[in-house]
Image: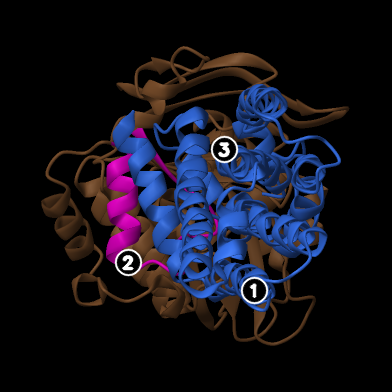
Amino acid sequence: MMTRIGAVMLKELTEFRRNRLIVITAAVLPVVFLVSPTASILSLKATVLSSVLQNRVDAALFFPLLIPVFVPATMAAYSVAGEREQGTLEPVLTTPVSTVEFVAGKAAAIFLPAIGIAYLVFGVFVAIVQFGAAAAVATAVLNAPQLPAELVFIPLLAAWAIWVGLAISARTGEIRVAQQLSVLASLPPVAIAALLSFHVISPTFAVAAALAGGLFVIDGAACFLVARLFNREWLVAGGKAATG
Amino acid sequence: MTATIEVSHLTKKFGGRTAVADVSFTVARGEIFGFLGPNGAGKTTTVRMLGTLVAPTSGSAVVAGVPLDRAGAAEIRRRVSVMPEAPGLYRRLTVRENLEFFARLYGLPDRDARIRRALESVGLSDRAQDPTGSLSKGLRQRTALARSLLTDPAVLFLDEPTSGLDPAASVEVLNLIADMRDKGTTVFLTTHRLDEAERLCDRVAIMNTSLRAVGKPGELRAQLFSRSLSVITAAPLNDPARVFLGLPGVREWTDASSGSRPAGYLLTVSDPALAAPAVTRALVAAEADVLFIGESRHTLEDVYLQLAGPTAKEER
């Protein structure tokens, strides 16, 4: 079982690496979400008003949360629609690979690079701020109450974006349509993270843990639902007779 | 005859539309079985059912010794190989990477050796590192065939394997299929190219939602068409009825040329070998200049058009 999941994952990663659109999306978005908040924080002086400082820190810490949403949504949308476009679903689904193995391999191939990039961007942002920003500003970033919550939210948001993207991709024939719908459908949990980041919901440990737990449960259920969507007959025939 | 595929009353409906209706046939081990029919006849749906991609609405089948049901599906997938009409290759992966991926999905031991053998058998060893997106259609089809050969399948389903190929590439693919039969693989070939079915297939089934006939091409011809002699003379005979009627083995005659030159006549006979000498003598006695006399052979196309129904005729 692990061999087949590994085979699907390896194949997906190789394909992503050679797909210019995916590479550009995976590279440009994180750079944008790193440069913008970093510049915003570095421009602050030590004497900045505390209200301004808090607003900037909130915004700066929220931006990197978009990475585990947009990057996996784009990759997941390509995942099945891309197979359908290349006509590869039929030969793959006539092999002994199970739908669970197929879905798990695809999800893992998106999850690992997506959270890797997101944590890397967070790490680079915090490092630059610690070394480059005024001491008071750097301390404010490091001690922001939402920071640990956001680190927990990264894999959960990525998982949500992947399941939603795979589900849409399984039902859509066109890659671009799938990508646009996937990004849209990935936004609701980001909205919750935004409420947390901007203190509309108080980012206490209990609140963050409850929200993260809820998202974890939803991710688990989504995994089950997506695996059900990967029905061989539906993927290949779409409920219609072939023309041959 | 040891059957590798046994199909009994297989039916598939998509909503209100019946794609395959009550189809039954068997395929012997090691034969090339042609599955012929016009577009929309249910050929691909039948392959998808036997390849476990689509569940039958009713009926049963045994594929490579395994019953076609939910419990047997995974085992059937291990034993058969399906090559759909589109080669279905990952364009950004190389030929070798494509084969490697499928070898891993099958959990094959000795992957490198198998891939090497498969590439050698389709003559693609020197293109192993090329991305499949850069290959011609014929080479992509050969790559897909190499992928199908990786597992040494008991049954190889080929859905329109020469569709869209130029004549040279088609011949290459057909030769590879003939090689597979020689190695003992059972080949289930769907096509609507009757020339390739006639050339390759041991038996054919003619399908148009339901099965119209199954048999060797020669047997189907004999079942459908009475045997006949074709006669061509330099000029029309003065009284053809007097020449042909009453000869041993000749049942009836028709004028196939309507008085033009050279003249042609079609004689319905019980046995061409018996009738031909008598007809020749009668023509000589009538002082006709005989240009040709021989058995008129019906092609598989004649059989197909007769059996597949009006849809097939409209397509031709």
Q: Indicate the secondary structure of the residue bearing disc 1.
A: helix
Viewport quadrant of the C terminus of chain B: bottom right
> The residue marked by circle 2 belongs to what chain?
B
Q: For the residues marked 1 and 2, what is the alpha-carbon distance in whole angstroms?
A: 37 Å
Q: Nearer the viewer, residue B261 or B2?
A: B2
Q: Is residue B233 left or right of residue A1?
A: right
Q: Nearer the viewer, residue A1 or A244?
A: A1
Which of the 4 image quadrants contains residue A60? bottom right
Q: Give the magenta-colored segment's residue range.
A: B80-106
Which tint was used for chain B? brown
Q: Position of residue B169 (x, y in %)?
A: 41, 75
Q: Which mark is residue A117?
A: none
Residue carrying label 2: B95
Q: Which mark is residue A152?
A: 3
Q: Position of residue A135 (x, y in %)?
A: 54, 66
Residue carrying label 1: A32
Q: For the residues marked 1 and 3, what is the alpha-carbon distance in whole angstroms?
A: 22 Å
Q: Position of residue B191 (x, y in %)?
A: 55, 53
Q: Which chain is blue?
A: A
Same-chain check, marks 1 and 2: no
* Three-letter amino acid code at the position of disc 2: Val
**Neighbours of disc 1 within 10 Å: few (<14), some (14-19), many (20+):** some
Q: Indicate the secondary structure of the residue bearing disc 3.
A: helix
Q: Which of the two labelled residues, at mark 1 and mark 3, occupies the earlier sequence position?
A: 1
* Three-letter amino acid code at the position of disc 1: Val
What scheme was used to colour the molecule? by chain
